[in-house]
Amino acid sequence: MKLFLDTGNVKEIEQLAAIGIIDGVTTNPSLMAKETGDYRKTMKEICRIVQGPVSAEVIATEFEGMIREGRDLATIDEHIVVKVPFTRDGVRACKTLSGEGLKVNVTLVFSAAQALLAAKVGATFVSPFVGRLDDVGQDGMQLIQEIVEIYRNYPFHTEVLVASTRHPIHIVQAAKMGADICTCPAKVIDQLFKHPLTDIGLTNFLKDHEKAQAARV
Ligand code: G3P
């Protein structure tokens, strides 16, 4: 399963990409609003670091505007994936932009029916938001199970990009279900690394090593 970083912060991306575990980046208008500096330059820099798919979301809400913006975003870098919201105009824009050979991520997906439509219009990625479903008392991961099952029944090429992940259990469950990608905030990636027994084990190994060294002198 691929891991994407859900952020527009170049420093966070640099640090985690250096480890070698980041396959792509997703951004959205809320994440980009936290960043200073020129939008296009930041996106270009993210693409240079990641060398994988980088989602850049359109702001337009009607079809013509989405097409204009999507085509323009795609000129920033070959790694740019145009992100469109799941609306009628967004789905139509996905069909057009995908038909032109651009990569499209259909976002704000909250039902299996929406994911089916996104696949039908050739989305490269579909982004179901699991955390936000959990927040309203629905089982977000149940939706992933349904989408994976539906996509397996047909020769769709759309990849399931699990978004709005909040903790490592989301990531592990997604991997067990066979989702293609999880996008995570840096905080969740940090949590993936952590286990108290690893820390205690390492401390003890090093202590024992020091004791043995001291006994030898
Ligand atoms: O990229 C969109 C998505 O991951 C948002 O997550 O935590 O704002 O629901 P969140």
Image (tube, grey):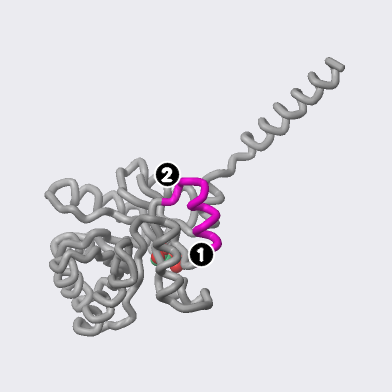
Asked if the residue under mark 2 is in contact with the one under mark 1, i.e. CB atoms within 8 Å, the reply is no
Amino acid at the residue labelled 1: Val
Q: Where the C terminus falls, by quadrant?
A: top right
Amino acid at the residue labelled 2: Val
| Residue 2 at x, y percent in the picture | 36, 48
Q: What kind of element bears circle 2? A: helix
Pointer 1 residue? 10
User: At 44% across and 73% down in the image, what residue appears?
Assistant: 41
User: At 51% across and 52% down in the image, what residue appears?
Assistant: 16
| Residue 45 at x, y percent in the picture | 45, 66
Q: For the stretch drawn in magenta, what is the main secondary structure?
A: helix
Residue 168 left/right relative to 147 = right
* Quadrant assignment, res 50: bottom left
| Residue 83 at x, y percent in the picture | 30, 69
**Depth-wise, is mark 1 or mark 2 nearer the camera?**
1
Instruction: Count neighbours of disc 1 (C-alpha within 10 A) and say few if under 14, some if 14 to 19, many if 20 or more.
Output: some
Q: What kind of element bears circle 1? A: helix
Q: Where the N terminus falls, by quadrant?
A: top left
Residue 20 among magenta residues: yes
Name the outermost residue toward the right: 217
Q: Who is closer to the viewer here, 135 or 68?
A: 68
Residue 90 left/right relative to 202 = left
Q: Is residue 135 visible?
A: no
Residue 114 among magenta residues: no
Q: Is residue 160 above or below residue 7?
A: above
What number is the disc on residue 172? 2
Q: CA distance from mark 1 to mark 2?
A: 26 Å
Magenta segment: 9-22
